[in-house]
């Protein structure tokens, strides 16, 4: 039945609806503080504004990117009154590329922001603070990233291949000839890559490119159609000139162009080499990764007779160094292919006191045989979702020490509250500056039985 139009208009309950802020609008704002993600926060016209590229005590002109209800997202267009902290970003693409968001903030202030974020999340979600705050683990401010994904897209309108990094909160590709956060061996590859890709015959078939550096440099090309012989030859010549391996990713898993190619990274303090394949998770910051492993072992204080459980073990980043110091390590990972490579890494490094298991760590662990054998200590390094199900049963393992490495302070705080409920005390916590020039927070926490 059709609805009759009476001509009456009804006002929503609660009064007149506030008009929405249009995208593209420019607004003058006074910035009060920084959000956890590094954006400036301002309050105007009853709304909270999150402004990329702005600092506290600044007055800026910002352009609206998105608005919903009482929250507006914006980007700094002009700095009208600058903070004394403001730096001129060394990268000409700062503010456009979505990779680095804090180059305008001194590194010491970046660390302070990350420290505040961790402390506030622990207090807010768990009403906790550690007995001791550890000094931040830091490396170099630039030239640290040993892995990068390069966006590639064929623009049919102008018949040109776009190559670069994606802009913040956008699918727009920012053309970049040089990236200052990449490790030095990848810089020549980055500079020469756009010309190489634009010389290929099947540019429309290119997906993305990944660059890697460890025991070797490598270029991975994702393609949606088979490549012709001439394109393969250009790629091989390019990689040979830059002393890099060529990996191809069409249908199925990535594979090296030369079957005997090996890609890996070193943990020098323990004389270990860990092999991996493109697609495996590997920490991008080699120096901070090695310092992180060393700190985790130091906090755990493993004894020669200990039996240790390593959850979310990946390729064995923590498990292999631990095996150098304890009687036995049980290492658990959810991805079967990673478990197989971890086993291979243990064998290649001559470690026989490691046992790897595949398990879905988002489910309870009680039924797993390895979970019932008892442990002196537990180390876990989960993804952003955290490890709530695993944490709920840690006390049942008998572990007296727990080292938790986190890439999300909010889920670390949630899981910390559960550990405290089981009788553990938060002894130490601190940040790991794995991603300088960004607001991304990695952290480590030590729990001991009270």
Image (cartoon, helix red, strand yellow):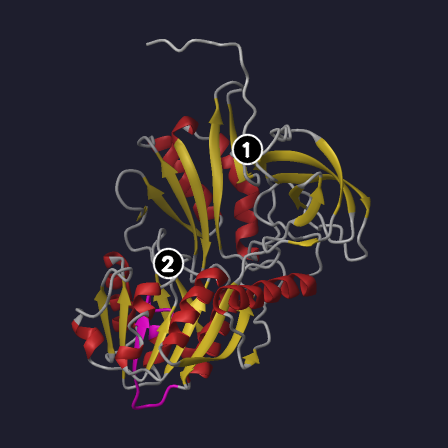
Q: Which disc number belongs to residue 172?
A: 1
Q: Relative to 10, say whether 78 is above or below.
A: below
Q: Which disc number belongs to residue 74?
A: none
Q: Relative to 144, say whether 231 is above or below.
A: above
Instruction: Report if residue 314 is visible in the image.
Output: no
Magenta segment: does it hold 437?
no
Measured from the top left, where is residue 377 in percent x and y?
34, 81
Q: Nearer the viewer, residue 80 or 140?
A: 80
> How many residues crowd mark 1 within 10 Å: few (<14), some (14–19), many (20+)?
some
Magenta segment: does it hold 307?
yes
Relative side of 102 to 358, left or right: right
Measured from the top left, where is residue 270 in percent x and y?
41, 78
Quadrant where the N terminus is found in the figure: top left
Relative side of 38 to 395, left or right: right
What residue is rendered at 53% in x and 56% in y? Answer: 185
What residue is rendered at 60% in x and 67% in y? Answer: 115
Q: Nearer the viewer, residue 249 or 72?
A: 72
| Residue 392, image quadrant | bottom left
Q: Which disc number belongs to residue 263?
A: 2
What residue is rendered at 29% in x and 90% in y? Answer: 305
Which span is picked out in magenta? 302-319
Q: Earlier in the sequence, mark 1 or mark 2?
A: 1
* Of the two numbered discs 1 and 2 in the rendering, the one whose residue sits closer to the viewer: 1
Measured from the top left, where is residue 328 in percent x and y?
26, 82
């Amino acid at each position: 039945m059709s609805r009759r139009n009476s001509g009456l208009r009804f006002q929503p309950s609660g009064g007149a609806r506030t008009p929405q802020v249009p995208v593209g609008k420019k607004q003058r704002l006074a910035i009060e503080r920084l959000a956890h993600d590094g954006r400036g926060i301002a309050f105007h016209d009853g709304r909270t504004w999150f402004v990329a590229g702005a600092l506290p005590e600044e007055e800026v002109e910002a352009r609206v990117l998105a608005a919903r209800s009482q929250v507006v997202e914006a980007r700094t267009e002009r700095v009208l009154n600058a903070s004394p902290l403001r730096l001129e970003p060394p990268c000409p693409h700062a503010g456009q590329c979505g990779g680095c968001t804090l180059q305008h903030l001194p590194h010491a202030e970046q660390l302070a922001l990350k420290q505040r974020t961790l402390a506030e999340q622990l207090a807010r979600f768990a009403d906790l603070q550690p007995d001791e705050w550890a000094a931040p683990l830091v490396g170099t401010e630039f030239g640290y990233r040993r892995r990068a994904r390069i966006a590639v897209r064929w623009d049919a309108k102008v018949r040109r291949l776009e190559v670069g990094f994606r802009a913040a909160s956008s699918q727009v590709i920012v053309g970049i000839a040089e990236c200052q956060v990449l490790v030095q061996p990848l810089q020549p590859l980055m500079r020469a890559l756009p010309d190489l890709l634009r010389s290929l015959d099947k540019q429309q078939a290119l997906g993305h490119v990944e660059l890697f550096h460890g025991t070797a440099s490598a270029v991975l090309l994702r393609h949606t159609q088979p490549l012709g012989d001439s394109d393969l030859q250009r790629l091989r010549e390019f990689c040979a000139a830059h002393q890099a391996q060529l990996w191809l990713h069409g249908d199925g898993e990535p594979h090296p162009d030369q079957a005997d190619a090996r890609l890996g990274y070193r943990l020098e303090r323990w004389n270990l080499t860990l092999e991996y394949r493109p697609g495996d998770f590997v920490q991008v910051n080699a120096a901070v990764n090695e310092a992180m492993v060393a700190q985790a072992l130091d906090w755990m204080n493993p004894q020669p007779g200990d039996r240790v459980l390593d959850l979310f073990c990946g390729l064995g980043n923590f498990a292999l160094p631990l095996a150098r110091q304890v009687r036995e390590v049980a290492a658990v990972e959810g991805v079967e292919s990673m478990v197989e490579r971890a086993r291979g890494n243990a064998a290649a490094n001559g470690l026989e006191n490691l046992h790897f298991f595949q398990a879905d760590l988002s489910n309870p662990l009680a039924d797993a045989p390895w979970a019932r054998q008892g442990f002196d200590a537990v180390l876990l390094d989960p993804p952003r979702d955290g490890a709530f199900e695993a944490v709920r049963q840690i006390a049942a393992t008998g572990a007296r020490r727990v080292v938790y490495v986190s890439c999300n302070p909010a889920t670390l705080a949630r899981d910390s509250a559960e550990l405290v409920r089981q009788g553990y005390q938060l002894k130490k916590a601190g940040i790991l500056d794995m991603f300088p020039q960004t607001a991304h927070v990695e952290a480590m926490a030590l729990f001991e039985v009270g």
